[in-house]
Image (cartoon, rainbow, N blue to C red):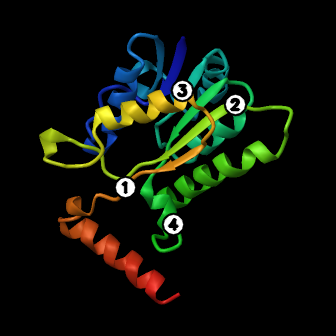
Amino acid sequence: MRVVITGSKQSNTPGHVMNGWMHNYFSNDEIVTISRSHGFDFYNDYNKIIDIAKTADVFVNSAAVDNFQVRFFQDLYGHVPKIISLGSIAADFSDAINDFYPKMKQQLKMKHKFLPLTDFKISSDILHITLTEVENKQENISGMSYNQIKKILDFWFENPFFTNIDLKYFKETYTDEEKLSKIKRVLAYYENK
């Protein structure tokens, strides 16, 4: 099986553990990595990336660079048999967190729900995963473990009948001031609605 993944296996950002997990999950397959460290620039090489991705059996839409996740999904839906997009809990609170990233993730999630309705003649098996925290033992962060994500993917490949999955909120990880501040803003926003 040929798998094209956006985002490199190694990332300096603790929150990008999932890229490595996706590479590990598909390690027995032919993997093509689309990232800066592999010589790809999303802005200048977009058409080249689309052409490469169209040769895949599975496209893993992982790297959150500007709105490229949304664009990749739109342009590859119906051209790649299976598409997995990594979303974020931020999408669910995009109105409360008025930043580009949550709005883009919300748009990605909605595209997974509604793009299949636009043309019944084309389709791909699609999976959008709303991520919260993922386990990172080096950073002492609890969350979804690799084995749990692996079970979800195994189940989806056997049963590609669901398109969106929202994962549990790991409240115990919201201990630093930045995260607590975001949560308080979100709660205050929705309490006033």
Q: Which residue is mark 1?
A: 168
Contact, mark 2 vs mark 1 (Cβ under 8 Å): no
Distance from disc 4 to disc 1, alpha carbons, whole Å, reads 18 Å
The amino acid type, in three-letter code, at marker 3 is Phe
- Identify the residue shown where x is 63% and y is 21%: 48
Contact, mark 3 vs mark 1 (Cβ under 8 Å): no
The amino acid type, in three-letter code, at marker 1 is Lys
Give percent across and percent down for residue 75.
71, 34
Please state if 135 lies on the left or on the right of 124 as rendered: left
Question: Could you say which is closer to the camera, residue 113 or residue 12?
Answer: 113
- Element under label 3? helix
**In front of the other: label 4 or label 1?**
1
**In front of the other: label 2 or label 4?**
2
Q: Which residue is mark 3?
A: 157
Distance from disc 2 to disc 4, alpha carbons, whole Å, reads 27 Å
The amino acid type, in three-letter code, at marker 4 is Ser
Give neighbour class at mark 1: few <14, some 14-19, many 20+ (Cα, 10 Å). Answer: few
Q: Which residue is mark 2?
A: 124
**Badge 4 or badge 1: first in the primary sequence:** 4
Q: Is residue 87 above or below residue 146?
A: below
The amino acid type, in three-letter code, at marker 2 is Ser
Quadrant where the N terminus lies?
A: top right
Q: Which residue is mark 4?
A: 94
